[in-house]
């Protein structure tokens, strides 16, 4: 895992992250965040914390303690591969104002590290065609096609 | 959801499915199943059952009560989309001896139904290029690229 710039931190999301809204701002670069009132946010953090062996919601903060990158690793227990585990990487977003600091790469390498510690046999994610090159730089390979059904 | 042939059933995986090994046989059409001793299998079933809001491991059995199709829906709680949920379809396998009965389609439509009941905003899965046509027949669309990292 490459090093973060001085003063930057990789850490788990917490209830205090509701206050400055930078978690929401960073995620809104990726997709629709929508309305999340404080009680709903706290309930989700509790839900994730009660299932730490599944949910690893992580962020990178800069020297001003502002969240500028997000990433989730969640761990699925399967029957295949001798009762193996798969790490799913989700909701990767990096603030464009922090480009050139390899924060996306550092986030992915940290999530892969968590998956390895959890004993996963692989890590997978779904992305746009335009992000394939970036994930290849992170050491990942094209494995298949993502199909979706929207309600 | 199209109807199953007479005597066929769609149901949740249970501990009793260790006995005849047909669950393992059906999954081994998809990929490596590996060695799963009975205590490990029972522990996984307990793990899944203790987390029923996340794990929906389902099978289709034929008129002889033999498992001939498998599929998992697991539900991820996100922050995006107003604290939305995503249904992940995994480990779809259908015994070739039962081809032409639309069991794959019925499995997928049933898993999508579970996801809708759980309030998911979308269902996604990863597949080989060669299965894209099948999933399109199930009402799904190409959404992106699956990238993977193997340990
Ligand atoms: C590697 C990565 O970050 N992939 C994300 C995925 O985690 C996220 O859930 C989705 C949201 O898209 P949606 O708003 O269209 O569901 O976008 C991307 O596929
Ligand atoms: C829709 C569907 O069934 N997709 C499956 C996935 O659920 C399964 O986990 C994987 C196993 O492949 P592996 O043995 O190479 O990890 O194969 C396919 O991608």
Image: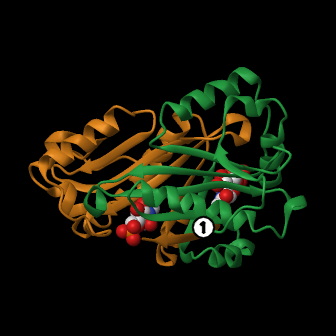
Chain colours: A orange, B green
- Element under label 1? loop
* Residue holding disc 1: B1
Residue A32 to residue B45: above or below: below
**Residue at the outermost left position:** A19
Residue B93 in view here: yes
The spot of residue A71 in percent (x, y) is: 37, 53
Residue at screen point 63% across, 41% down? A78
The spot of residue A33 in percent (x, y) is: 25, 64
Callout 1: chain: B
Question: Ligand 2 is in which quadrant of the figure?
Answer: bottom right
Q: In which quarter of the image is the N terminus of chain A?
A: top left
- Is B7 on the left-hand or right-hand side of A146? right
**Residue at the outermost top position:** B39
Residue at screen point 9% across, 49% down? A19
| Quadrant of the rendered image containing residue B126 | bottom right
- Is A13 on the left-hand or right-hand side of B13? left
Q: Of residues A102 and A131, which is closer to you in this image?
A: A131
Q: Of residues B125 and A90, which is closer to you in this image?
A: B125
The spot of residue A133 in percent (x, y) is: 52, 72
Residue at screen point 72% across, 40% down? A81
- Is B127 on the left-hand or right-hand side of B123? right
Q: Is mark 1 within 8 Å of ligand 2?
A: no
**Residue at the outermost right position:** B97
Residue A64 in view here: no
């Amino acid at each position: 895992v490459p090093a973060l710039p001085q003063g930057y931190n990789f850490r788990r999301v917490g209830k205090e992250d509701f206050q400055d809204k930078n978690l929401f701002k960073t995620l809104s670069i990726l997709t629709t965040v929508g309305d999340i009132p404080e009680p709903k946010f706290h309930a989700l953090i509790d839900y994730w914390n009660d299932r730490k062996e599944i949910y690893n919601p992580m962020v990178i903060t800069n020297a001003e303690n502002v969240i500028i990158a997000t990433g989730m690793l969640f761990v699925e227990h399967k029957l295949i591969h001798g009762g193996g585990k798969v790490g799913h990487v989700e909701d990767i977003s990096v603030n464009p104002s922090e480009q050139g600091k390899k924060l996306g790469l550092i986030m992915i390498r940290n999530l892969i590290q968590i998956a390895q510690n959890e004993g996963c046999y692989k890590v997978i994610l779904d992305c746009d065609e335009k992000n394939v090159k970036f994930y290849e730089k992170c050491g990942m390979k094209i494995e298949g096609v993502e199909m979706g059904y929207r309600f």
